[in-house]
Image (cartoon, rainbow, N blue to C red):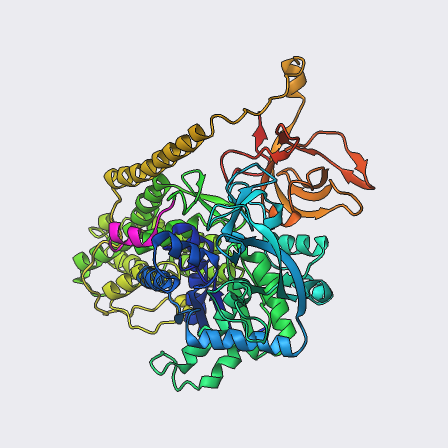
Amino acid sequence: MKYKRHTVTAALPYANGPVHIGHLAGCYLPADIYVRYLRSSGEDVKFICGSDEHGVPITIKAKKEGITPQQVVDKYHKIMGDAFKEFGISFDIYSRTSSKTHHETASGFFKTLYDKGVFEEEITEQYFDEKANQFLADRYIIGTCPKCGNENAYGDQCENCGSTLNATDLINPRSTLSGEKPILKSTRNWFLPLDKMQPEIEAYIDSHKDWKTNVFGQCKSWLNAGLQPRAMTRDLDWGVKVPVGGAEGKVLYVWFDAPIGYISATKELFQNPTSNIQHPKSSDWELYWKDKETKLVHFIGKDNIVFHCIIFPAMLMAEGSYIVPENVPANEFLNLEGDKISTSRNWAVWLHEYLLEFKDKQDVLRYTLCANAPETKDNDFTWKDFQAKNNNELVAILGNFVNRTLVLTHKYYEGNVPVAEEYNKADILLLEEMSKYPAKIAASIENYRFREALAELMNLARMGNKYLAENEPWILIKTDPKRVQTIMNISLQICANLTIVMEPFLPFTSKKLATMLNLNEGLKWKDATRTDLLLAGHKINTASLLFEKVEDEQMVYQVTKLSNSKMENEASKSKELSQNSEEEKPKVAEGKPEITFNEFAKMDIRVGTILEAERVPKTDKLLKLKIDTGIDIRTVVSGIAQYYKPEDIIGQQVSILVNLAPRMLKNIESRGMILCSENEKGELSFVSPVKPGTNNGSIIK
């Protein structure tokens, strides 16, 4: 379907800390590439984002720093907004959920659903801190994770094993406010009846089977498990007040409030007379949220899939006048030097620090993050790879081709584009191939395959490099100067086309190259199919290097910086372990009888990725899994339902015994066995590959 306009959103980042490379690779960079391409293609698009300034992480940060929540969000809203802008993330607006417009919009949305009778009012028991005299939101409660034994799991999630939790699941819960054990106390809240809306939501999800596998699979797992009512209000004092009687001391649940931030930010964009919109009407925002000819796309990380694919669409459906997302191209997670990025452990590359330490190298990070984007599985960022991407690709291929072309043009023709005297057969084929690249790159971008699109961009640069190397104009100039004119004209045309197709990925480099080529502004994507962007006689400007080498010293500094963080974390962990040394060590099971090597060698153990997961009906322990083993995609029934929720393990890599004879379990043929470890309590945990992003089918020996 051809749409009249596009509304593109990037996940609202929590304003309790700076932006790191995991955030960028997860959603902000792919969203920016997509939007820049749409703009270049002449599409009507609005790119919306802003700071998420409510929720418990904000209040926890405020207490930790001894300041007010408003001071916290003011501080980090500026840090994030400035960093995004300097990095070239081209939002049409970067708003915030503490704004008056947002509070009015979120309150109005809730009131509409309330007046329509959508919500169900329920009295439930929630944890209450008697010493602090307040109800505890999920993040104000910590305790022992029932899945992995982590003693510092939050009331909504264990960051150690990644499991989604309820506060009442925790063993030995304690309040982060007072350290006391909380009690259960009755309170009233308003619930969105997702269970009653499931048929409508399921029909919506099933109509989008073209979504990325990880997104569609996670949604189906939630649906297969059966949706449950979810509270849309919380007993807190920081957030959007619940706009109904009898709701004193309550605010909107942050995941009700936050996605409405996309809508309120769009309103602000059209209300702002200084925006770049020509003749805006304050009511025009509705076209981008209520017109069926608008395509709504959410860019997020995989931890936000359920909120953007199920809960927010359910809210929009219940309201009745809004469009729902057409696509939610969520990425997996980016790891750092083989370890999970963690803000609490300071194991991260912070964007604002990178921009200070690598002046004018925004595009090097953009290139590296896009080339390593975790589009289908978790991926890893290393400083060694960052250096290699810069030196071996940007400098040696793209930069080298452009520099040689421009330097030779100045040397031979005083900076004037030479006339192409005569094309031979190879020239004609090359020009035809060059004109196909915009369509190739566009197709990849439109299907959210940004790594593939970037590779095609570099293939165009490689083609230019190869053309120069094979024709050797620096040698041919002595014997056939007319032939050299054609060679240099074609090379310059490739450079001109590169300025257009590289702009979504490398906007700073694109602008720099366009300036050197003295190209007119306003060229669009369709112009990149032309082979005459630079006419004979056109004067180009002085050449300069597009990229400079990244030296070993810079990498040593960055790796040392991370090593220092790791040592500090290990020292802190050792201190914590020594404090708990009195605790009884867990008992270890006795060893089994010896086997021969040949007996062991019969087992074929591979790395696989869980694509789908759902409970087996009428059982407490069994999950039905669909696993990509690298060899095939197969069904495995595993007795892990007590330790893992289906929606939490989509996309997780596991070790699987693939040559175990099939057997029937509850009328399901199970082909293989997931390897798990078992602790002294009999609790199971996946035995996963140590290195994130290991290829499916890799043999475990």
Where's residue 198, x and y in %? 71, 63
Q: Is residue 130 left or right of residue 100?
A: right
210 displayed left or right of 196: left
Question: Where does the image place residue 187, in percent across and percent down from the top left?
Answer: 61, 62
Residue 318 figure quarter: bottom right
Q: Position of residue 167 (x, y in %)?
A: 59, 50
Depth check: give the residue in front, 174 or 289: 174
Q: Which residues are magenta?
A: 348-361
Residue 135 to residue 696: above or below: below
**Residue at far right of view:** 667
Quadrant in which the C terminus is drawn? top right
Residue 600 against residue 439 in the figure, above or below: above
- Residue 322 shows up from this direction: no
- Residue 392's quadrant in the figure? top left
**Residue 329 lies within the magenta run:** no
- The image quadrant that residue 89 belongs to is bottom left
Examine the rendering and report whether any part of residue 406 can be seen.
yes
Quadrant location, the N terminus: bottom right
Q: Is residue 370 left or right of residue 680?
A: left
Which one is in front, 595 or 294?
595
